[in-house]
Amino acid sequence: MSPIISRFVFGMNWLASKEQQPSANRQFATSGEIKSIFAEYNESLYWTALVITAEAELAKQSVVNASEFDSTAGCVFHDWLTQWAYTATARAAVQAFSQPIHAAARCYSDWICNHSRHDVLEEHQINALRKLDPREIARDLDPLARTVLVFHGCHHASISACAMLLRVPRKYVLRAYCRALQWELESVQGHSQAKTR
């Protein structure tokens, strides 16, 4: 993916912002700070990659690959560093797992969406989802639905941004997210309610 498309997808024109800032201004994370955030959130980043790939080795390699994006080290705002780490990890997982995602997209050509809205997940929903074993999510959801659940549901990327990143028609991304929302409602929320009884 070209840097121009990448900046458009995530709405963060880091390079342009950097050029407008004085060099002495320390708004941007250093390479060491980026490595530190990957170490601090390693388990959670691994979970993110494992939900997408459903393969332990691919997930581990995705986290490693994302942590080595040093070419952008001078372009990541401190305030966005944690979110950037999750996005970079998810992008690395998608790059390693693109064929299954594209194959799954074809299943949504005739799928009917019955949601009027496709809201992102709220914090309590994301926290409940993160408590699940990624293998359980992979068992119940296809690769596209899992990936859109991570990008749109958890990381709040727009449906259009997801479509561009995944190179999948927007309507398929929307339908896959609809499927993921149905699953989240039935499985995750149902599981949480059963525990409180």
Image (spheres, rainbow, N blue to C red):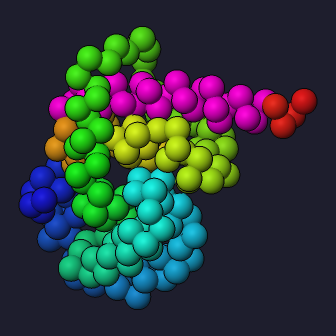
Residue 194 drawn above or below residue 149: above
Residue for point 38% across, 75% down:
61
Q: Is residue 117 left or right of residue 16?
A: right
Image quarter hosting the C terminus: top right
- Magenta span includes 195: no
Q: Please identify the quarter of the rendering in which residue 31 is found.
A: bottom left
Q: Looking at the image, which residue is at 22% across and 43% down? A: 102
Q: Position of residue 93 (x, y in %)?
A: 34, 61
Q: Position of residue 194 (x, y in %)?
A: 81, 31
Tell me the residue at 57%/32% (across/down): 184
- Figure check: 197 above or below 130: above
The relative height of residue 107 versus residue 57 in the rendered view (above or below) is above
How many marks do you count on the picture? 0
The quadrant in which residue 186 appears is top right
Residue 82 visible in image? no
> Overall secondary structure of the magenta stretch?
helix
Q: Quadrant of the N terminus?
A: bottom left
Specify whether residue 122 is in view. yes
Q: Quadrant of residue 62?
A: bottom left
Region rendered in magenta: 169-193
Q: Nearer the viewer, residue 79 or 90?
A: 90
Along the line of sight, the residue nearer the viewer: 77 or 84: 84
Q: Residue furthest right?
A: 197
Q: Is residue 113 left or right of residue 122?
A: left
* Residue 97 x/y as whole percent: 29, 57
Assess whether residue 175 is covered by the magenta stretch.
Answer: yes
Q: Position of residue 141 (x, y in %)?
A: 47, 38
Say which of 75 and 19 sits in front. Answer: 75
